[in-house]
Amino acid sequence: MKKIKYLIFLLFITIPTKSFSLIEVDITRGNLTPLPVAVSPLSYNQKSKLALEKVLKIEDLGAEISKVVENNLKKSGLFNPLIKDAFLQKPDIAHLKPRFEDWALIKAQALITGKVDLQDEKLRVEFRLWDVLAGKEMLALAFTTVPKNWRRVGHIITDKVYERLTGEKGYFDTRIIYVSEKGPKTKRIKKLAIMDQDGFNTKYLTLGNELVLTPRFNPTNQMITYLSYFRNLPRVYILDIETGIQEVVGDFAGMTFAPRFSPDGKKIIMSFAKDGNSDIWTMDLENRIIKKITTHPSIDTSPSYSPDGKYITFNSDRSGYQQIYVMKSDGSKVKRISFGNGLYGTPVWSPRGDLIAFTKLHKGKFYIGVMRTDGKGERLLTENYYQEAPSWSPNGRVIIFYRETKSDHQGEGFSAKLWSIDLTGYNERMVETETDASDPSWSSLLSN
Amino acid sequence: MILSKICRSTFLVVLLSMVLSACATQKTTTTATAIKKIDAQIQGDVYAGKDTVKYLAEGVPDRVFFATNESVLTTASRDTLRKQAAWLRKNSDVTVVLEGHCDERGTREYNLALGERRANAAKDYLMTYGVSSDRISVISYGKERPVDSGSTPLAWSKNRRSVTVKAN
């Protein structure tokens, strides 16, 4: 009797809280238990199945799209996609009305279902996100696109699910631009390459005839700016990804390097080196007016704007060693912010505006870390033999960088690979690339 | 019984420590010779060997070496550059490119700037010794073109260099 009373009491307090607060995933802490989620294969009728097979030469597109979603969720470190063998309900029926008991039985807390169709040669996808324990639909969306964009559909679904469950924008429908590397260390061949965030759809943008370094996206992801040694003149270029048109922007009598776009995409900020002195300059892409931002006989390089465009963080050895500085975007009020032991380089302002990611070299080890924009709260995320060049995911939760290994005098043992790590310091993983890779730069979200 | 056990274990410990100390001494001697060998080639963090050096003419080395993170010319470097300047003054039709390089232990962008600074340090010195600036151009490769692929202090010291290359 007492037991039953207790149970009733429990039901009263648990039921209301459950129905009011749907599942949430906290992304500010590391090492939490990933949320068990079931991604049901997307369903379709026989007619659409055959038509899609014909158009895309993919046998089971519904399953393939769900695999893209699963893979994304798994790599985020926040979700644990469950094995499909254990699913009891058929995809088409689950999408209409899931039997929540069945999904609860396999310990799923969230369920993703969906349906694909081919309508007027367009791919139509709808999906739903369900809270299994609360027995409720959390999200339902449909979109239409060209069939060859089917992987992007998987990424967009992941973004929507991530956003609904974490309360923050995702980073899955994005691309990475990087430098693809091949050949011996002494004669390394480097090409610009672009791929989806999950390593698929790699395209090479240059042929490898000249050395290219440090590509970065503009805010709309249509252009990149990078350093090319075309005709043995190291200069900053811009490249239109769609048209393939390249253009030199930093054709000064000297070397221009370390370029980035301003947050409004209208300017390039870069270093210009002449007579042994590197300073930071900007060029307005519309009227080609150049402006000198720093004036100091030391090395000033690796500039990066704050997201509001009001400040610039950069790397300088004016104190005698490489340190990180912040100044107003007109070059005034220069302030050193890094004061820890060791050397600091490659500062990059977070898209959220509150942090600066950097590379630190201390006692022969390389670290990727973050600090607040006033230099306080330094936190080192990862230590290795060699790693540098952090770049932020568009939501500011993940950092991608590259890592090199030691080699002998013949170059044996050398590799350069892309890695990512969460801002929490957890979920460090290698990012698959077709070749060796370096200098990654993360795009913003391709769709919103 | 217990005693014999203790005896046996002590014996084992003694034996083990003997083996270990033998290993340790052997190791230190090999590293000591290795360090000696490297010391002969690196003086004050600057490469002093001849392994990678080529010659613009007889007795005129083509390159100078730098300490980590430095662009200051050493006495040996200044000596080499004076020889280059004398040779350039004699061969007034020759133009040169000074290629500045760094080791792999730095961030890419900073190294590009540092390589430029190193090549310019060499250029300034050549100019002081009478070589006109319009005969000298400068390029930095940062850490992109090492001569030695190794990940050792010796390899790095060979890679921290400014190389004078004939351009015509």
Image: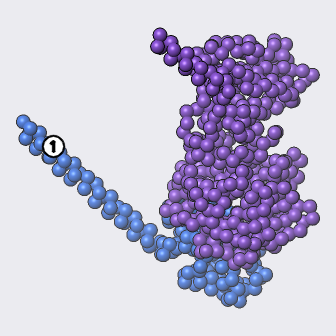
Chain colours: A purple, B blue
Residue shown at 50% from the left, 12% from the top? A4
Q: Residues within 10 Å of mark 1 (few under 14, many from 20)?
A: few
On the picture, is A362 further left or further right than B168? left
Query: What percent of the width, then of the height, locates residue A23?
Result: 65, 29
Say which quarter of the image contains residue A274: bottom right
Assign the C terminus of chain B to one quadrant of the image: bottom right
Query: What percent of the width, then of the height, locates residue B167?
Result: 75, 73
Q: Amino acid at mark 1?
A: Ser
Using the rendered image of the protein, determine whether residue A353 is visible from the camera's viewpoint: yes
Query: Is A61 above or below relative to A295?
Result: above
Which residue corresponds to mark 1? Answer: B9
* Label 1 SS: helix
On the picture, is A368 further left or further right than B112? left
On the picture, is A150 further left or further right than A135? right
Chain hosting mark 1: B
In front here: A410 or A216?
A216
Say which quarter of the image contains residue A328: bottom right
In front here: A171 or A400?
A171
Residue shown at 60% from the left, 65% from the top? A338
Residue located farthest toward the top when viewing the structure as drawn? A1
Query: Is A412 above or below relative to A166?
Result: below
Assign the N terminus of chain B to one quadrant of the image: top left
